[in-house]
Image (tube, rainbow, N blue to C red):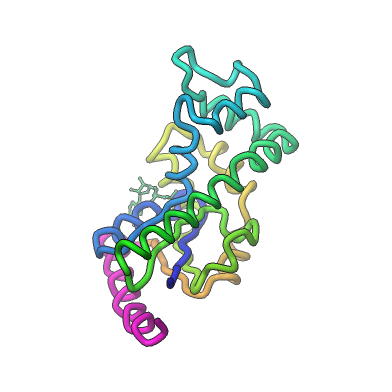
Amino acid sequence: MYVVALTGGIGSGKSEASKQFASLGVPVVDTDVIAHELAAAGSPLLKEVDRIFGADFFNADGTLNRTKLRTHIFSDANERVKLEQLMHPAIHQKALQTLQENEQKLHPAYQLLVVPLLFESNRYQSILNKTLVIDCDESLQISRAMGRSNLTADDVKKLMLAQTSRENRRDLADVIIDNSGTVSELAEKINEFHKKLIKTCIVSK
Ligand code: ADP
């Protein structure tokens, strides 16, 4: 198995980059998507959230009030740790399982594992062959993240402060892809990266 981890700050273009990898036929395992699935209405994990945080964080239809929970954990570090201790091991386990299943079913040259907070823990380190950072300057991150959601600039800045710094991410990356141009320029860079990597994987597999 050859695994490339994709990371980057909020609004840097991880989702846009993942789409491009998927269009090239690369299996994409996204830990944010897994987190969403694990917190689907009625799931065992959601029952734990209910037990620990209480019914206040649920909508009338039993779904999680994600906005309320997010605001809550970003205003209280202890609460954030509690949620992370619940979610992260489950996400990690599901991600590994999906990678294994893809490997057996699809025999891909490599797989992409999308982990927004890759460098904030060393949870995935042992299974990674390469780390790829999608990068753009912070003002672009803010305007793009605002364009995608109803977050204010202050909200985005707060989320950025809860993540590792751009500088640290760039220091730790094996490869950095700059996303300050257009989406098609990003796609072109990913195509180049993909072509080179395929050759490496054929040799190392
Ligand atoms: P992330 O997943 O890293 O938070 P996204 O991929 O969702 O970031 O990008 C944030 C927003 O910016 C999205 O609306 C996306 O379509 C847009 N976007 C990403 N890359 C570019 C780009 N190169 N040019 C213009 N818009 C972009």
Does 74 appear above or below 97? above
Residue at the limit of the structure toward the top, as seen here: 60
Depicted 198 relative to depicted 12: above or below: below
The overriding secondary structure of the stretch rendered in magenta is helix
Q: Is residue 4 left or right of residue 199?
A: right
- Whether the magenta-drawn stretch holds residue 83 is answered as no
Quadrant of residue 121 within the rendered picture: bottom right
For image coordinates 31% across by 64% down, the residue present is 26
Of all residues, the one furthest to the front in this rendering is 104
Residue sticking out furthest to the bottom: 203
Residue 187 screen position, x and y as percent: 28, 64
Stretch in magenta: 181-205
Question: Where in the figure is residue 79, as x and y percent of width and height?
Answer: 71, 33
Q: Position of residue 142 (x, y in %)?
A: 48, 46
Q: Quadrant of the N terminus?
A: bottom left
Query: Residue at point 54% right, 51% down?
Result: 93
In terms of depth relative to the viewer, which is nearer, 158 or 84? 84
